[in-house]
Image (cartoon, rainbow, N blue to C red):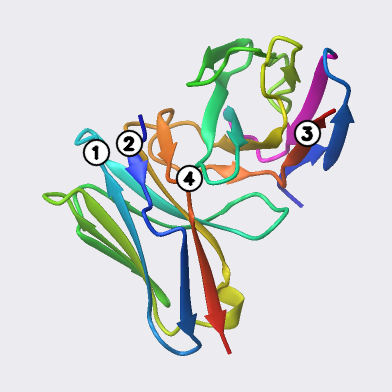
């Protein structure tokens, strides 16, 4: 039972444009959401998070939006850079020990 | 440097052999986790530990065992009972209280021949 879904396995954007990565979840008990970035042969690194009491969190070029009614999460990267090319995982949790990950979206930013 | 180390990076074993994957952290984190990643799937939780000498099963614990004798170390043993052991294994740690992100090690790719 996949509670966190990233329906787009890949996304390609031009350098300087906006990248939008999407994530849907089914468990309405999730109250903390995170995005991780992963390069090949490395572990994921934390990128940005948002709690369920907010609908937006911004950190530099990265903004996460949360739509609780739609059970939808998105990550916006503006402007996209070639170094952003990686696999991005969405994760959601109820408390600290029940974190569920999506399957990931491979972002390619073309120069 | 604070961080999480996993060794080795690549590991090959014959079918039927147990194998232990190492995970060490010097972040002084209380909680540690083991995940498995398969192609096209998200990370799936195998085991986690919130404190020394205590650990809990995750979603896919069958065929695996862990120990947490020290705060810094959380080794994972892949036993011969695990039907599909070939995968990428990731160890993570977190502060352990409240809502905190998990920090991941570089992973170990296990191939069972």
x 74%, y 22%: residue:
B75
CA separation, marks 4 and 1?
Answer: 21 Å
Q: Residue A103, image x and y in percent?
A: 47, 47
Q: Nearer the viewer, mark 2 or mark 4?
A: 2
Viewer-proximal residue, B23 or B52?
B23
To which quarter of the image does residue B76 belong?
A: top right
Q: Chain of mark 1?
A: A
Q: Earlier in the sequence, mark 2 or mark 1?
A: 2
CA separation, marks 2 and 1?
Answer: 5 Å
Q: Which residue is mark 1?
A: A26
Indicate the secondary structure of the residue bearing disc 2: loop
CA separation, marks 3 and 1?
Answer: 32 Å
Q: Residue A104, image x and y in percent?
A: 48, 53
CA separation, marks 3 and 2?
Answer: 26 Å
Tag 3: Cα neighbours inside 10 Å, few (<14), some, or many (≥20)? many
On screen, B80 above or below A45? above
Instruction: Tell if the residue under mark 3 belongs to the same chain as the one under mark 2.
Output: no
CA separation, marks 2 and 4?
Answer: 19 Å
Q: Nearer the viewer, mark 3 or mark 4?
A: 3
User: Is any atom of residue B76 visible in this view?
Assistant: yes
The circle on residue B110 is 3
x 77%, y 41%: residue:
B5
Viewer-proximal residue, A52 or A88?
A88
The circle on residue A3 is 2
x 51%, y 69%: residue:
A107
Instruction: Tell if the residue under mark 2 belongs to the same chain as the one under mark 1.
Output: yes
Tag 2: Cα neighbours inside 10 Å, few (<14), some, or many (≥20)? some
Region of the chain picked out in magenta, as a range: B17-30
The circle on residue B101 is 4
């Amino acid at each position: 039972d996949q509670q966190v879904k990233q329906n787009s396995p890949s996304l390609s954007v031009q350098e300087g444009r906006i990248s939008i990565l999407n994530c849907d979840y089914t468990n309405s008990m999730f109250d903390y959401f995170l995005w991780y970035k992963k390069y090949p042969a490395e572990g994921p690194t934390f990128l940005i998070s948002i709690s369920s009491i907010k609908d937006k969190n911004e950190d530099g070029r990265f903004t996460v939006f949360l739509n609780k009614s739609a059970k939808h999460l998105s990550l916006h990267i503006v402007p996209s850079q070639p170094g952003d090319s990686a696999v991005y995982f969405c994760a959601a949790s109820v408390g600290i020990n029940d974190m569920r990950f999506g399957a990931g979206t491979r972002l390619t930013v073309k120069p | 440097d604070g961080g999480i180390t996993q060794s080795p990076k690549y590991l090959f074993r014959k079918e039927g052999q147990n194998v232990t994957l190492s995970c060490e952290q010097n972040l002084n984190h209380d909680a540690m986790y083991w995940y498995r990643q398969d192609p096209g799937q998200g990370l799936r939780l195998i085991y986690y530990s919130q404190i020394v000498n205590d650990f809990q099963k995750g979603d896919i614990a069958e065929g695996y065992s862990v120990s947490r004798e020290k705060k810094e170390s959380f080794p994972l043993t892949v036993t011969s009972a695990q039907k599909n052991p070939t995968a990428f294994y990731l160890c993570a740690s977190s502060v352990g209280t409240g809502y905190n992100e998990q920090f991941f090690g570089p992973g170990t790719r296990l191939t069972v021949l």
